[in-house]
Structures are given as structure tokens and as C-alpha cells.
């Protein structure tokens, strides 16, 4: 009888540990022009990615950053640029400092709707730095295997996806979501762009949302070339390269309007 009780206790402890592995977390709040988005980070499942993301959060580098890419039924992307003032030919958006270098890829979880994942260079799985995106739909068939798999490191909680969907529903100039129409001959300002005023940690306790059960990435090892950095899948693509050109797109728009 003694042995049976101990076995039951051990099994219960093992199950609790398994649950904690998925739910140990930091909760952060993304404060945007359209409302706040809370995200449960998966510290234990993707520790290096979360550490990298929090280094940008804690250093304040995401303050006054912009949502610079929005593709309907796909993703909204941020973490590339900060807004420094009215846009003209020479200034207005500044690249976030990524001199700390890239983070190793951790494609453990699936790119389902409501998850947050890291952007990176095409053909280089281990090239993620500051850029990240929200999955608007189930992108697992594409992003779980493309370029070594895109690392999901958190999940939107509460009513946060209402805000994400509101951003995704905005009209766009190029790939930028625009809150206020850009008038001829008028500078592009923070009234036009979706600005992230800051990202802050709101809960750093060990188990923040134990009911969350993120889906594992079961496709990465089953797909031929899934871990090779192959970038041949449709959609998604080279997120960071596209984000660099996005800033040039607004600059061209500014010159055309002038």
C-alpha cells in the first residue's frame, strides 16, 4: 500500500512538472495606439528567445516602436523601428539596435492564431534579433517548417486578440497599417502610424497561466528539409528583409506626396 501511494504521488508530481514546463511564464503588456495586448511568454519552452525578447523590453528599446507590417489573414509585425518624429527623406524611423546579436532558433511550438513569434532573415534559422509578429491565423503548415521553423515564444491572453485584429483591419500604406489617412503634402506622424508606446512586464511569477496548453510544433521534424533553413514554402518569407524595405516604402510615399 505504501508503494502504491508513493507511485500515485510521483505520477501527480510528474504531471504537475509537465504542466509547469508549458505554463511557467512572464506576462508582458504591449501598449499600442489602439489598446493594450497581454502576452504570456513561454520562458521554460523557449528560454533563449524569451531572454532575448525581455532584454529589449527591459532596456526600453521597444518604447515608441511601430507596427511596420500588416498582411491580412497572415501576420502583423513589429520590433523593427522606433518612431523619432515626422517622417521625411532622412529621418522619422530609426532601426532598433540589434548589436547584441541573433538568438538561436527554438521551433518548439506551433504558429497558431494568437501566438507571437520571432521574425528573421530568409535562409538563416538562427538570425532572429528584435523583430516579432502576431499570427492572425493558423500559419502552422507554412511557418512551422519554413526556414527551420519560426520560433513561437508566447501567446496572447485575455481580449488581446481584439486589439491585434483591430490593427490588422486598418487600411494600409504599403504594408504599414494606418490609423489616420495620410494627406497630400502633410508629414507622416504618430497620428498616422500604429505606435507601441512601450512593452512592460506585468507579472513575473513562475506560473502565471497554468491553463494554457500551447500546441507543440509536430511538423518541423516530419518535413523534409524542415531543419535545414529551406525557405521555399509559400508566404511568410524573409521577414526582416521585407521589414527593412517597408521603411523605404514610406519614404518613397513621402517624397511622392511632396
Image: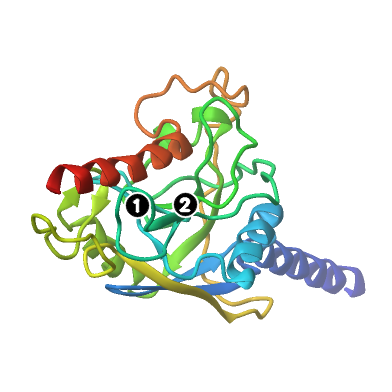
What distance separates the C-alpha of mark 1 from that of mark 2?
A: 8 Å
The x and y percentages for residue 221 are: 61, 28
Taking the spot 67% from the left edge, 49% from the top edge, the residue there is 99
Residue at disc 2, secondary structure: loop
Task: Indicate how the structure is coloured in the image.
Answer: rainbow
117 left or right of 37?
Answer: right
Residue at mark 2 = 80
Q: Residues within 10 Å of mark 1 (few under 14, many from 20)?
A: many
Q: Quadrant of residue 111?
A: top left
Does 68 appear above or below 34? above
Does 2 appear above or below 213? below
Residue at mark 1 = 68
Taking the spot 55% from the left edge, 17% from the top edge, the residue there is 224
Seen from the viewer's position, the closer of residues 50 and 181 is 181
Residue at disc 1, secondary structure: loop
Q: Residue furthest left?
A: 184
10 left or right of 62?
Answer: right
223 left or right of 32?
Answer: right
The x and y percentages for residue 247 are: 35, 45
Taking the spot 43% from the left edge, 65% from the top edge, the residue there is 156
The x and y percentages for residue 203 are: 59, 81
| Among numbered discs 1 and 2, the one appearing first in the sequence | 1
Disc sitting over residue 239 in the figure: none
Total marks shown come to: 2
Image quarter in which the N terminus is found = bottom right
Seen from the viewer's position, the closer of residues 238 and 180 is 180
Tags 1 and 2 touching, CB below 8 Å:
yes
Amino acid at each position: 500500500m505504501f508503494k502504491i501511494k508513493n507511485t500515485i504521488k510521483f505520477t501527480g508530481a510528474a504531471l504537475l512538472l509537465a504542466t509547469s514546463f508549458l505554463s511557467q511564464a512572464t506576462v508582458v503588456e504591449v501598449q499600442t495606439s489602439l489598446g493594450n495586448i497581454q502576452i504570456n511568454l513561454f520562458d521554460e519552452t523557449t528560454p533563449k528567445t524569451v531572454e532575448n525578447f525581455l532584454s529589449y523590453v527591459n532596456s526600453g528599446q521597444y518604447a515608441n516602436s511601430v507596427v511596420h507590417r500588416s498582411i491580412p489573414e497572415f501576420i502583423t509585425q513589429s520590433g523593427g523601428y522606433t518612431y523619432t518624429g515626422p517622417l521625411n527623406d532622412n529621418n522619422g524611423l530609426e532601426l532598433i539596435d540589434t548589436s547584441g546579436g541573433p538568438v538561436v532558433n527554438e521551433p518548439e511550438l506551433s504558429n497558431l492564431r494568437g501566438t507571437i513569434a520571432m521574425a528573421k532573415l530568409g535562409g538563416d534559422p538562427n538570425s532572429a534579433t528584435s523583430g516579432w509578429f502576431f499570427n492572425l491565423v493558423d500559419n502552422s503548415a507554412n511557418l512551422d517548417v519554413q526556414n527551420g521553423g519560426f520560433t513561437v515564444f508566447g501567446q496572447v491572453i485575455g481580449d488581446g486578440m481584439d486589439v491585434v485584429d483591430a490593427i490588422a483591419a486598418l487600411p494600409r500604406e504599403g504594408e504599414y497599417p494606418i490609423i489616420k489617412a495620410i494627406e497630400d503634402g502633410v508629414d507622416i506622424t504618430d497620428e498616422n502610424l500604429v505606435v507601441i508606446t512601450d512593452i512592460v512586464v506585468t507579472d513575473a511569477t513562475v506560473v502565471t497561466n497554468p491553463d494554457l496548453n500551447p500546441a507543440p510544433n509536430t511538423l518541423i521534424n516530419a518535413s523534409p528539409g524542415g531543419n535545414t533553413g529551406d525557405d521555399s514554402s509559400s508566404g511568410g518569407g524573409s521577414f526582416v528583409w521585407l521589414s527593412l524595405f517597408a521603411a523605404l516604402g514610406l519614404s518613397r510615399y513621402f517624397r511622392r506626396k511632396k
